[in-house]
Amino acid sequence: MGLKVLTGIKPTGQLTLGNYLGVLKNLHQYTEDGNEAYIFIADLHALTLPIEPETLRTNTIDIACFYLAAGLDPNKCTLFLQSSVPAHAELNAIVQNYMYMGELGRMTQFKDICTKMGIAKDAKDSHVGLGIFAYPVLMSADIVLYDADIVPVGQDQTQHVELCRTLVNRFNHRYGDVLKMPKAVNNKVGAKIMSLSDPTKKMSKSDPKGDIFLKDDLAVVRKKIMSAVTDMGSEVKFDPENKPGISNLLTIYAATKGISIEDAEKEFVGYRYGDFKKAVADAVCADLEAFQQRYRHILETKEYEKVLKDGAIKASEQANKVLDQVKNTVGLVTIK
Ligand code: TYM
């Protein structure tokens, strides 16, 4: 029997090569083999940090186009906007009562954001928004609404899925077997693409220096790869501790080509760093060129509009089933 698959991307900033190689590029694989896939744009999540309305709108449409450009067939999956399925916000209001502030405060992403913004982690006196603190609550609602078996994500989101599992355990312990237990799955290669300017840090939407953005001009992409930070020595070898820069570029190459790190390493025996970087740039640019062409076509034809409209209806059908069951379970009266 097929599995239920769910994942989302939030339209906070321009998507990076990390988002692409970490999850987007291989998503279509999960829509094969009789799986039931729900793929969405986490637009409500994007409001957890300050964002201009116009930027949010542009990023949202971009992600819809990116999903399609990455090969997702809307006939084989349900593609939708989180905010077009009200069940997400409703279930959020219920499940927040089964998650603890201590748990939320321990999330690495929350702590990193506080550090970056220079705000205190202790909620009491700081100006940290409630939404960013409670982020994993809404994310848990997103997941359980679709009875998801698996949640394909990059490494940085695994901790949030683990917290969702804690919620499911707690809820089911109290009420019986109501919520489905999800599991995070990471790509074998590419689950954590690092910054090109500091390969000890994750490539993220908010780090313009070390990022490759999916809409970057290909000449810019090439330049960024050619000037990526490398390491001491001259051997092209996968050794994240001692050679984080080269290891990151090997990962980027392997994930782009869909091969293992070992096979990528074999291709570059005896290469100098400069020639190796050129090969990485060639591979990434070839892949992005085709991807960007598809993206532009989808954006122009507005193909995403009908997809998102149909997706909202299909997603709501599934989500409302779980929402009704949860409401009934906790004792909320539904009058039909
Ligand atoms: P977001 O929008 O930050 O990232 C989208 C996906 O890209 C992955 N990713 C990376 N993978 C590899 N290397 C990187 N440098 C890199 N940076 C990001 C992320 O792990 C993610 O899979 N909270 C989610 C959105 C979300 C969600 C959900 C995901 C909301 N509800 C329910 C799954 C299930 C997020 O902010 O992802």
Image: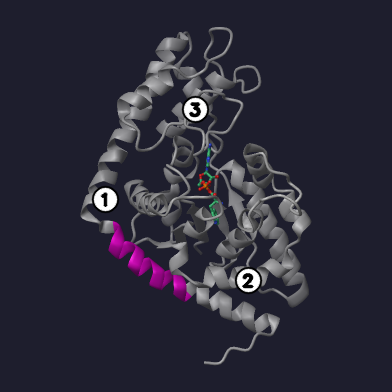
Three-letter code for the amino acid on which mark 1 is drawn? Leu
**Depicted 214 relative to depicted 284: above or below:** below
First along the sequence among labels 1 and 3? 3
User: Magenta stretch mostly in which secondary structure?
Assistant: helix
Where residue 137 appears, as percent x and y from the top left, is 64, 61
Three-letter code for the amino acid on which mark 2 is drawn? Ala
**Mark identifier at residue 116:** none
Task: Identify the residue shown where x is 55% and y is 47%.
Answer: 153
Q: Is residue 264 visible?
A: yes
Dot 1: what SS?
helix
> Taking 22 as reference, is 332 left or right?
right
Q: Is mark 2 within 8 Å of ligand 1?
A: no
**Depicted 168 relative to depicted 264: above or below:** below
Q: Which residue is mark 3?
A: 210
Three-letter code for the amino acid on which mark 3 is drawn? Gly
Task: Identify the residue shown where x is 47% and y is 41%.
Answer: 19
First along the sequence among labels 1 and 2? 2
Task: Identify the residue shown where x is 73% and y is 76%.
Answer: 176
Image: magenta residue range: 304-317
Q: Residues within 10 Å of mark 2 (few under 14, many from 20)?
A: few
**Mark identifier at residue 93:** 2
Q: Count the marks: how many?
A: 3
> Taking 330 as reference, is 214 left or right?
left
> Which of the two residues, 197 or 236, is positioned nearer the viewer here?
197
In reply to whether residue 184 is colored magenta, the answer given is no
Q: Which residue is mark 1?
A: 299
Task: Identify the residue shown where x is 78% and y is 55%.
Answer: 102
Where residue 178 appears, as percent x and y from the top left, is 66, 74
